[in-house]
Image (cartoon, rainbow, N blue to C red):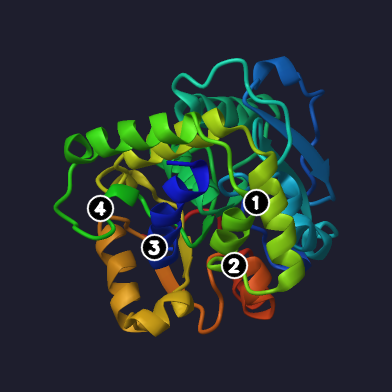
Amino acid sequence: MNLTAALRPICAALLLSASAALPAAAAAPAATLVADNPTAHPNFTVRVVGKGRPVLLIPGLTCPGTVWDETVARYQKQYQCHIITLNGFGGTAAPASTDKLLLNVRDQLLTYINTQKLRQPAIIGHSLGGFMALWMSSTQPEAVGPLLIVDSLPFMGAIQNPATTVEQVRPMAENLRRQMSQSKANPVQQRQMTASMVTDTARITQVTRWGLQSDPATVAQAMYDMYTTDLRPDVARIQQPVLVLGAWAAYKPYGSTKESTAAIFNQQYAKLPHYRLEMSEAGKHFLMYDDQQWFFQQADAFLKQPTVAAK
């Protein structure tokens, strides 16, 4: 099985699943940057743009940090944007090792926040980036601020059956990792798959290119890690406000409704103390592209909330 064929059912699952600033009148001062040491985070690079309260932007599978370019352009005058790119995605050099890939990314990001003395930064994460934001916050609840989760779930393995466990998913995940690691993506099939997640033709071309340029072993390990990590019980430790933005439109032709897809999100986030779910009417998986005005309306309001949720 080639890489694209292996990814197709995952993208279908993703489609189904799919610190915060003070008001402008009392804006928080910009964080003072400490000289970054890239060797301390070998699994990702960081680009810092803008002034104001810090916000981390984490992209999804195969995407570099440039997936957030329009978001950064909108917020860089109000926020200090820390734009993350996972090594091995979108044409960047693959990491030296993929062992415990996402666990290492999580720990290195938390260390980066501490080293840079970022005071409870907000995190905006798409897909894999949303999963990472949940993992970071549930690991060190005091380290980060509000979370804006863009079409992502705490446990990919249980999208179709909420009773599914990690051990039940592991054999499938291991087989998928092996197939993906040994496959080379087919450009035509890659574009077809991307078209199920993005609407605009130019965006489809760009996201397809990122997928083709990504390191197969890194992508395979990232998928394995998400499939074998169940954050549903862990999100109970998150005390920050969380806004979850969900997509469902791509599955409307197959019988899915906004209500049925929202039920999947609510089931997975049931133990999260302070969250709000909003469903896009028109967007596919890349909501910051497909439903940009709505995305910015949601993000604008959310980023003005207090850092810690009210009890």
Mark 3–mark 1 distance (CA, rounded to whole Å)? 25 Å
Residue at position x 51%, y 22% from top?
98
User: Which of label 2 and label 3 is nearer to you?
Assistant: 2
Q: Where in the figure is residue 19, as x and y percent of width and height?
A: 62, 50
Q: Of the residues under marks 3 and 1, which one precedes in the sequence?
A: 3
Q: Where in the figure is residue 191, as x and y percent of width and height?
A: 63, 59
On screen, 91 above or below 43? Answer: below
The answer to whether any part of residue 168 appears in the image is yes
Q: Of the residues under marks 4 and 2, which one precedes in the sequence?
A: 4
- Tag 3, which secondary structure? loop
- Tag 4, which secondary structure? helix
The answer to whether any part of residue 310 appears in the image is no
- Label 4 crowd (10 A; few <14 / some 14-19 / many >=20): many
Q: Which residue is mark 1?
A: 187
Q: Of the residues under marks 1 and 4, which one precedes in the sequence?
A: 4
Q: Which residue is mark 2?
A: 195
Q: Where in the figure is residue 83, as x and y percent of width and height?
A: 72, 44
Q: Nearer the viewer, residue 54 or 18?
A: 18
Q: Quadrant of the N terminus?
A: top left
The residue under label 2 is which amino acid type?
Ala
User: Which of label 2 and label 1 is nearer to you?
Assistant: 1
Q: Of the residues under marks 2 and 3, which one precedes in the sequence?
A: 3
Q: Which mark is residue 17?
A: 3
Residue at position x 40%, y 29% from top?
178
- Tag 1, which secondary structure? helix
Residue at position x 67%, y 69% from top?
289
The residue under label 3 is which amino acid type?
Ser
Give the image quarter of residue 42: top right
The residue under label 1 is which amino acid type?
Pro
User: Which of label 3 and label 1 is nearer to you?
Assistant: 1
